[in-house]
Image: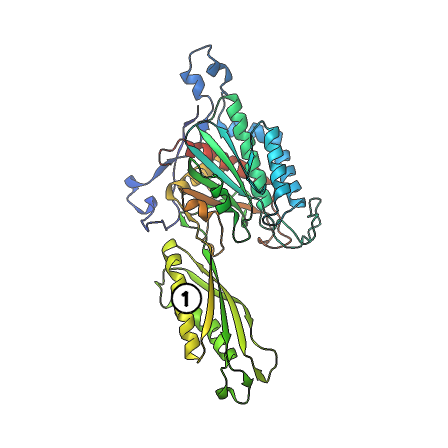
Amino acid sequence: MYTLTAEKVVEMGTATKSNEPLPSAIAPEARLVVAGALPTLNAAVESAAPGTIATEQAMATSLPDFLDGWLAAHASEIVAARRHIHANPRLSRQEHDTAEYVAALLAEAGLDPQLIPDGTGLTCDIGTGDRVVAVRADMDALPINDPKQVPYRSTVDGVCHACGHDAHTAMVLGVGRVLAEIERREGLPGRFRLVFQPSEEQFPSGAPTMIKYGALTDVAAIFAFHCDPQFLAGQVGVRNGPLTAACDVMEVRMKGLGGHTSRPHLTSDLVNAIGRVVVDVPALVTRRLDPRQSVAIVFGAVQAGEAANAIPQEALARATVRVHGRETWEMIPDLVQEVTRSVARASGVECEIEYRRGVPPVVNDRVATAMFAGATAAALGDEAVVEAPMSMGGEDFAYYLEQIPGAMARLGVGRPGERLDIHQGNFDIDEKALEHGVRVMTHTLLAAAQNPAF
């Protein structure tokens, strides 16, 4: 079986779930030391009697060397899988073809994938044991045109993998095949679960669906990557504590007596009122919160009237409300609505508010984050580990982390000299990142399986 032979002292980030300092901020002797996820595949040889099956089947090689050989033989197949998925994107809740494609590849590797009832997602267990370590990939694409002139350009008009979910899926497929090969050769140190989910981009999202159908049953920890073109291929961004924001949506509607712009005093001036809401509410809300709490209220839609000389009878504004941290997210809806109504009343107008909850924030577990960093250093070298900034974007991986420990890391997919971002039609990746992702995630999962913290 696997034994961890290297240790890494992980120093990164500043925030934790409990606002405790990270070990690097404590006295040196109290630092958190985690295994560097450098398993050896010959431990069975050392412990088994000569002539036993374990001796004959164990691989006298390290995990990095094993991965070198496996990727030399199969990296092109991971690239091909990613390109197939990229060329055949499916929108949220329409991932049936993608799920069937993934299931077929897993079955070819001798595995037993299980589709969820609607056929848009699947799970696959590898190995045995009561305790499970999971890895998640999302499979849906975006309603964006693909303008790239590449052989794997989207064949579906107006639909494109512009967020890297094709890469996530291909990498987890690769990890699954690696784990299956290790299980076949000498056995795994526990049970592992591949989780391929639908609908990360659309609300209601797919993570709760997968949880409903048992994706987290017996799972002790879960890990995931998100492609990030701000980091070059070969870099992995890690962060302890909050990584992404919670994201809610607020819609404000106003109605009143319209009239001529020459006599606004005889009307309910809804343009003035909605304008004050758009300008004043974000600023006033921040004055009611601890300055250390990150909150971003941004209005993306405002509608009020058509004619220049007529004050309208209706006005509408829509905004996203993004916050870091679970405690702030719990209290922000009441505060935002209170301030919004107060601003509207100051303009002589009452308003109706529809406030819709979105995804919670991704808050990485400190031990899981340290495990990711140690695994990255073991797989790619110390210089590959970089600190990921907090993002105001939303990510439904948070639903898994609300129930079990885990972490998401930013996988560098950028190419030198390019400035691309996700959710753009021309987004693409350095496909060498797929190999890096398989290496790091394999190290992470095997190390987590042996960590008593999970």
Task: Where is residue 108? Give x, y as percent.
Answer: 62, 29
Task: Where is residue 178? Give x, y as percent.
Answer: 54, 30
Q: Residues within 10 Å of mark 1 (few under 14, many from 20)?
A: many
Q: Is residue 177 above or below residue 246?
A: above
The quarter in which the C terminus is drawn is: top left
Task: Where is residue 23? Give x, y as percent.
Answer: 33, 44
Is residue 75 in sight in this rendering? no
- Residue holding disc 1: 336
> Which amino acid, mark 1?
Val
Q: In the displayed structure, does residue 379 sit left or right of residue 159? A: left
Which of the pair 148/265 is nearer the observer?
265
Task: Where is residue 209? Give x, y as percent.
Answer: 50, 45
Q: In the displayed structure, does residue 404 sit left or right of residue 29? A: right
Q: Is residue 56 above or below residue 269?
A: above
- Name the residue at the top extreme: 51
Which of the pair 264/394 is nearer the observer?
264
Q: Residue at x 42, y 15 (%)?
A: 48
Q: Secondary structure at mark 1?
A: helix
- Name the residue at the front extreme: 117
